[in-house]
């Protein structure tokens, strides 16, 4: 089970930091490499990351573990159905259209749900680990996540970008997300050691 925790954390952090340059390289030629386009991309990713943390906090606090597990597994399945992360040509801006809202819509439709779920993984998996292994230190998983994030950032310009096309990278990324979704769903649904009472209900007693 510890290997499943580690594999889920490593895959999520690696994919989280790989997808930003991949999707940026795919769509920015359509919208130009202006500061406004880059700002919209960064705003989207940061806001989605914040929503992921909020989801992790609220579901851990107010949902029973079994309900949280089934909700998360269902969202992982829905995200897997949106793959691969290759935007349709229909998203290309036309003359007179507002590129800002079009770019936000493209990002939300292409990578929104997968990126959201990846952003939930760090805090959510550490919470599950702490529930199943009382007394253990979940922050080792945080250190592992940081290492995988750094690996994702460094491997893109040094390994992936010089050797693969954008379409190939997006295909590899989509396959990696499919594997992550299997790991994370298995971890969510196999949590036998978690308390059946939500955190808020335990506090009220």
Image (cartoon, grey):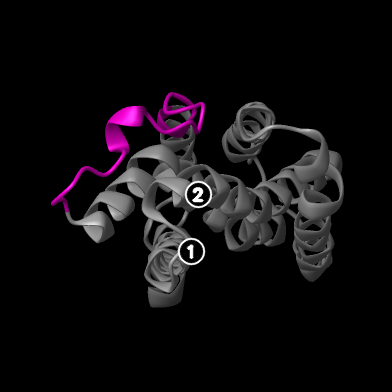
| Front one among 37 and 108 | 37
Task: Check whether the beta carbons of the residues at disc 2 and disc 1 lie within 8 A of each other.
Answer: yes
Query: Residue 148: image x %, image y %?
Result: 80, 56
Q: Is residue 25 above or below residue 188?
A: below
92 in the magenta segment? yes
> Left or right: 102 with respect to 116?
left
Q: Is residue 39 above or below residue 72?
A: below
Q: How many marks?
A: 2
Q: Residue furthest left?
A: 96
Q: Secondary structure at mark 2?
A: helix
135 in the magenta segment? no
Any mark on residue 49, and which? 1
Q: Is residue 66 above or below residue 153?
A: above
Query: Residue 197: image x %, image y %?
Result: 46, 56
Residue that mark 2 sits on = 115
Helix, strand or loop: magenta stretch: loop
> Left or right: 131 with respect to 51?
right
Q: Earlier in the sequence, mark 2 or mark 1?
A: 1
| Front one among 72 and 108 | 108
Quadrant (top left, top right, bottom left, bottom right) of the C terminus: bottom left
Give, as a single range, the part of the protein colored magenta.
78-97
Q: Secondary structure at mark 1?
A: helix
Query: Residue 2: image x %, image y %?
Result: 84, 45
Query: Residue 149: image x %, image y %?
Result: 75, 60
Q: Residues within 10 Å of mark 1 (few under 14, many from 20)?
A: some
Residue at the spot 18% in from the left edge and 56% down from the top edge: 98
Q: Quadrant of residue 17?
A: bottom right
Residue at the spot 34% in from the left edge and 40% down from the top edge: 109
Residue at the spot 46% in from the left edge and 60% down from the top edge: 52
| Front one among 22 and 174 | 22
| Front one among 114 and 34 | 34
């Amino acid at each position: 089970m510890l290997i499943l925790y580690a594999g889920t954390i490593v895959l999520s952090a690696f994919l989280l930091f790989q997808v930003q340059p991949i999707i940026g390289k795919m769509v920015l030629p359509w919208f130009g490499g202006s500061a406004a386009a880059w700002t919209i991309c960064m705003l989207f990713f940061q806001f989605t990351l914040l929503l992921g943390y909020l989801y992790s906090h609220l579901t851990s606090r107010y949902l029973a573990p079994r309900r949280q597990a089934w909700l998360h597994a269902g969202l992982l399945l829905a995200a897997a159905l949106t793959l691969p992360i290759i935007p349709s040509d229909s998203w290309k801006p036309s003359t007179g259209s507002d590129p800002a809202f079009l770019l936000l819509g493209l990002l939300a439709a292409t990578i929104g749900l997968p990126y959201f779920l990846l952003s939930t993984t760090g805090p959510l998996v550490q919470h599950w680990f702490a529930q199943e292994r009382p007394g253990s230190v979940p922050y080792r998983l945080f250190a592992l996540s940081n290492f995988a994030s750094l690996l994702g950032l460094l491997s893109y310009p040094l390994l992936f970008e010089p050797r693969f096309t954008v379409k190939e990278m997006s295909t590899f990324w989509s396959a990696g997300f499919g594997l992550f979704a299997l790991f994370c769903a298995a971890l969510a649904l196999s949590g036998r050691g978690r308390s059946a009472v939500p955190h808020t209900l335990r506090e009220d007693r």
